[in-house]
Image (tube, rainbow, N blue to C red):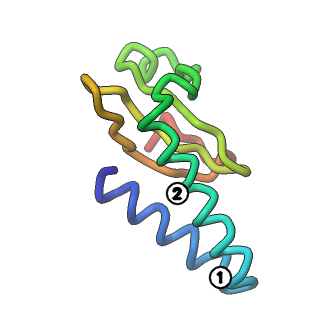
Amino acid sequence: MLQIAREDMVEIYLYIAADSPKAALDLAEKVAGKIDTLADFPLIGKIVPDTELAKQEYRMLMIDGYIAFYKVVGDKVVVYRVLNAARNYPDL
């Protein structure tokens, strides 16, 4: 996981924790668990619908209103970003 993806996770946690620390922790655990699953099932996410990102082989995994953007690089999975699904991700 890239540093910026870790920072995304922290931002998500802090935003939700302001209203509900338990909900923030639950979501953080769920996102981390799903991302861990990618190690065993790297193709579980779908190809990103954006043409330019798809050409670069980005994949996306939906997790409770958030999207983990990643690539399969050799035998590894690299998570690039974790963003709210409502964001205009091709512009980021």
Could you say which quadrant of the image residue 57 lies in?
A: top left
Q: CA distance from mark 1 to mark 2?
A: 16 Å
Q: Position of residue 48 (x, y in %)?
A: 54, 24
Could you say which quadrant of the image residue 67 lies in?
A: top right
Could you say which quadrant of the image residue 58 lies in?
A: top left
Quarter in which the C terminus is drawn: top left
Q: Residue at x 58, y 55 (%)?
A: 31
Is disc 1 placed on a helix, strand or loop? Answer: helix
Q: Residue at x 72, y 51 (%)?
A: 64
The image shows residue 24, relative to residue 44, as above or below, that is below
Report the residue that reaches farthest toward the front.
40
Dot 1, crowdedness within 10 Å: few (<14), some or many (≥20)? Answer: some
According to the picture, the residue beneath numbered tag 2 turns out to be: 32
Sequence-earlier tag: 1 or 2: 1
According to the picture, the residue beneath numbered tag 1 turns out to be: 17
Q: Position of residue 8 (x, y in %)?
A: 46, 61
Tags 1 and 2 in contact by the CB under 8 Å rule? no
Observer-nearest of 85 and 60: 60
Q: Position of residue 70 (x, y in %)?
A: 42, 36
Numbered disc total: 2
Q: Residue at x 74, y 84 (%)?
A: 19
- Three-letter code for the amino acid on which mark 1 is drawn: Ala
Dot 2, crowdedness within 10 Å: few (<14), some or many (≥20)? Answer: few
Left or right for 73, reference 59: left
Q: Position of residue 71 (x, y in %)?
A: 37, 30
- Three-letter code for the amino acid on which mark 2 is drawn: Ala
